Image (tube, grey):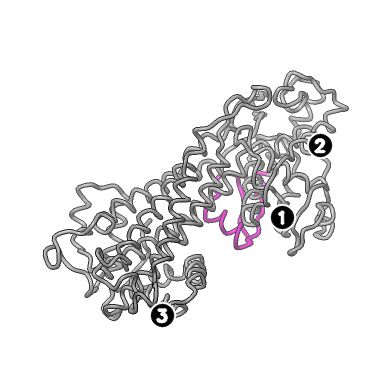
């Protein structure tokens, strides 16, 4: 069980709750603070103070004062009217991450909800009631309003949810799980949907996946270096100490350890003086993406433990600020950066695939088949990789450079951060397939020499691949092989086996 305190949640814990079904519990001290803030909200209502979102309408209607009798209806109407998402439902792991992050935000005690609201979300999370949340419809500005409203629909007995593998009406899913639906009171509807939790949920899982994928990229690159008798002098630590970007240093270190004891690599001057950039500049190219991912991770660690509500209540100072902590811009730019960084991972991988299959560049049989002409070998594998890379280039265009005013120009600049996060997710999927193809092509190329002469780390990777995917002696449906290598990458098994032998690969 993961204890939540609103200030120490990590991306690793988000992954554990989202994908490993870890349960959560709230620290008692946080419940006390939440209760105190709720008492403050009720005093505001009793004294009829004009406070945005509590005794007023929303957005352009912020100047409309709502009576006490209408305040509860206002909160329900807010959820119903804002549930305007479209598209396919978000994946279960994303939905679980959304619920977790919303809880972690609310328990900080600045939002004014009752403990029962937070406890209901926790029960849904721990019992596997996963609201159906359409993936599109958020501007990433006044929080992820539309998708978060779909989450709240289930809490109030509306909408739909997945429960034990079935898609059910929200009220039925809650009933089967033994969870009481709630009736929203003042401020609670707004507090539940005003925040960046959808974009950050997707972003957290993207960041986690990108870090694991980057290790596979280093492994694939090391295998390609051996397949092409690459020059290892380019990875010498002394070279990288004089340009000490951390990602570059880490990648060079990984390459040296993966290739340790290899008898397939060369030194400068033995076969050639220098290699092409996609081999010689592996530390610089991979390292730049690693540094980008590290930056995004640092921003996420702030955001998932931050208050992204509006208005924000400071009970000790008896003040309520209507500000813009819900705005997604601090996340939108990093998520675009992550998408670009991962797209570059696929770019360099595809260029190495080309070097492996092109006989004019590799000195190996054309398209890595022993019977060219009758068989096509890896010819169309490179086509597929090129198609994925080209698609990535299209969707890597920064979403954050766009803005469309909304709410009658009250919300006149929006972040598009959720779109940036979704683009990053799609790019990671494409990059995973490209890197998988490089792993297969490198293993096939190595079979034309002698896999017994591989380095310490690359030998482990090669052996794991060959457990499930045999050498291609004659043409077969490679789609099946692509699916197998995709699954192997997703399990992270190659990385775990290598790290058990040579220590952790640095990111």
Q: Residue at x 78, y 24 (%)?
A: 55
Give the number of the mark in front: 3 or 1: 3
Residue drawn 75% across and 27% down? 54
| Neighbours of disc 3 within 10 Å: few (<14), some (14-19), many (20+) | few
Residue 25, numbered circle: none
Q: Position of residue 90 (x, y in %)?
A: 65, 52
Height in image: 99 above or below 439?
A: above
Under circle 1, the secondary element is: strand
Pointer 3 residue:
474
Q: Is residue 127 left or right of residue 436?
A: right
| Residue 11 in picture, x, y percent from top left | 52, 52
Give the farthest residue toward the right. Answer: 69
Find disc 1 in the rendering and name its residue.
130
Q: Given contact means CB atoms under 8 Å apart, are the residues at marks 2 and 3 in contact? A: no
Please give the range of residues in magenta.
Answer: 1-30
The label nearer to you, 2 versus 3, is 3
**Residue to which mark 2 is pinned:** 76
Which badge, 2 or 3, is on the more N-terminal residue? 2
Question: Does 246 appear above or below 191?
Answer: below
């Amino acid at each position: 069980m993961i204890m939540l305190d609103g200030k120490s949640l990590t991306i690793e814990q988000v992954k554990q709750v989202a994908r490993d079904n870890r349960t959560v519990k709230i620290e008692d001290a946080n419940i006390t603070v939440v209760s105190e803030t709720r008492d403050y909200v009720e005093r505001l209502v009793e004294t009829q103070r004009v406070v945005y979102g509590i005794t007023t309408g929303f957005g352009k209607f912020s100047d409309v004062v709502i009576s006490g009798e209408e305040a509860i209806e206002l909160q329900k109407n807010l959820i119903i009217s804002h549930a305007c998402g479209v598209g396919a439902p978000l994946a279960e792991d994303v939905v679980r991450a959304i619920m977790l992050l919303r809880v972690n935000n609310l328990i900080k005690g600045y939002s004014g909800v009752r403990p029962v609201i937070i406890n209901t979300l926790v029960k849904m999370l721990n019992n596997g009631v996963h609201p159906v949340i359409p993936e599109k419809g958020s501007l990433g500005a006044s929080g992820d309003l539309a998708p978060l409203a779909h989450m709240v629909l289930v809490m109030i007995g509306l909408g739909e949810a997945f429960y034990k593998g079935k898609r059910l009406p929200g009220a039925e899913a809650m009933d089967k799980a033994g969870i009481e639906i709630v009736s929203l009171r003042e401020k609670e509807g707004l507090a539940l949907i005003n925040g960046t939790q959808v974009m950050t949920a997707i972003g957290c899982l993207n960041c986690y996946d990108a870090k694991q994928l980057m290790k596979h990229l280093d492994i694939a690159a090391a295998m390609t270096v051996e397949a092409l008798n690459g020059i290892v002098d380019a990875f010498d630590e002394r070279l990288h100490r004089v340009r000490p970007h951390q990602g570059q240093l880490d990648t060079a270190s990984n390459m040296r350890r993966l290739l340790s004891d290899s008898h397939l690599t060369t030194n400068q001057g033995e076969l050639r003086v220098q290699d092409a950039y996609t081999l010689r500049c592996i530390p610089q190219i991979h390292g730049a993406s690693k540094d980008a991912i590290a930056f995004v991770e640092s921003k996420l660690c702030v955001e998932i433990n931050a208050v992204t509500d509006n208005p924000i209540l400071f009970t000790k100072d008896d003040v309520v600020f209507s500000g813009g902590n819900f705005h997604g811009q601090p996340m939108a730019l990093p998520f675009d950066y992550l998408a670009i960084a991962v797209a570059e991972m696929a770019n360099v991988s595809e260029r190495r695939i080309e070097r492996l299959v092109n006989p004019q560049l590799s000195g190996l049989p054309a398209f890595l088949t022993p019977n060219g002409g009758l068989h096509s070998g890896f010819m169309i594998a490179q086509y597929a990789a090129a198609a994925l890379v080209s698609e990535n280039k299209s969707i890597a265009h920064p979403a954050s450079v766009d803005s469309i005013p909304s709410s009658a120009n009250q919300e006149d600049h929006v972040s598009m951060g959720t779109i940036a996060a979704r683009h990053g997710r799609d790019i990671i999927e494409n990059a995973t397939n490209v890197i998988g193809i490089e792993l297969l092509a490198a293993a096939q190329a190595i079979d034309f020499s002698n896999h017994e002469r591989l380095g310490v780390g690359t030998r482990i990777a090669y052996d794991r691949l060959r457990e499930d995917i045999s050498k291609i002696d004659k043409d077969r449906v490679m789609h099946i092989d692509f699916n197998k290598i995709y699954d192997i990458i997703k399990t992270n098994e190659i990385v775990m086996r290598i790290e058990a032998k040579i220590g952790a690969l640095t990111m």
